[in-house]
Image: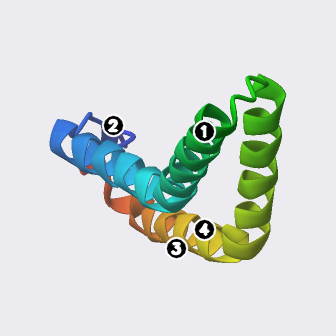
Amino acid sequence: MQAPEIGVDLEAITRLCHGALQTVLLAIAPIIVIATVVGFVIAFLEAITAIQDQGVVTTVRLLTVVLLLFVLGGDMGQLVFNFASAQFQALGNIGVRAP
């Protein structure tokens, strides 16, 4: 009796990678957008007030990201968990061929 041959299904792997990248982008996009907007607003306020301290921008951005992670972390984790769960369920169908 022969063991099943394990082949590489490039289409399935491509779909998996595409889905993983899409899930990560959907999970982190709100944080990136809001941190960018906050950085621009703080930079604009610095330009108006002639305060040239990079520590202010960095501190405000860091606090914003931490706050957003606290608020949106559960939803982000649920999105990643749902994707991973679906992939583990489909794992048995990828690349196994009967002899």
At horizontal 61% and vertical 76% (from top left) the residue drawn is 75
Amino acid carrying mark 2 in the image: Ile
Mark 1 Cα within 10 Å, few/some/many (few <14, many 20+)? few
Q: Which mark is residue 58?
A: none
Q: Looking at the image, tell me whether mark 4 or mark 2 is earlier in sequence order.
A: 2
- In terms of image quadrants, where is residue 73? bottom right
Quadrant for the N terminus in the image: top left
Residue that extends furthest to the left in the rendered view of this protein: 11
Q: Are marks 1 and 4 in contact (CB under 8 Å)?
A: no
**Residue 9 pos. (x, y %):** 21, 40
Residue 99 in view, yes or no: no
Amino acid carrying mark 1 in the image: Ile
Residue that numbered label 3 is attached to: 82
Q: Nearer the viewer, residue 87 or 25?
A: 25
Count of marks overlaid on the render: 4
Q: Is residue 65 above or below residue 52?
A: below
Q: Looking at the image, tell me whether mark 1 or mark 3 is earlier in sequence order.
A: 1
Closer to the eye: label 2 or 3: 3
Residue that numbered label 1 is attached to: 48
Residue that numbered label 2 is attached to: 6
- Measure the C-alpha gap from mark 4 to mark 3: 10 Å
**Residue 52 pos. (x, y %):** 73, 23
- Measure the C-alpha gap from mark 1 to mark 3: 45 Å
Closer to the eye: label 1 or 4: 1
Q: Is residue 46 above or below residue 27?
A: above
Q: Looking at the image, tell me whether mark 1 or mark 4 is earlier in sequence order.
A: 1
Q: Looking at the image, tell me whether mark 4 or mark 3 is earlier in sequence order.
A: 4
SS type, badge 2:
strand
Closer to the eye: label 4 or 2: 4
Amino acid carrying mark 4 in the image: Met
Mark 2 Cα within 10 Å, few/some/many (few <14, many 20+)? few
Q: As drawn, is 91 to the left or to the right of 13?
A: right
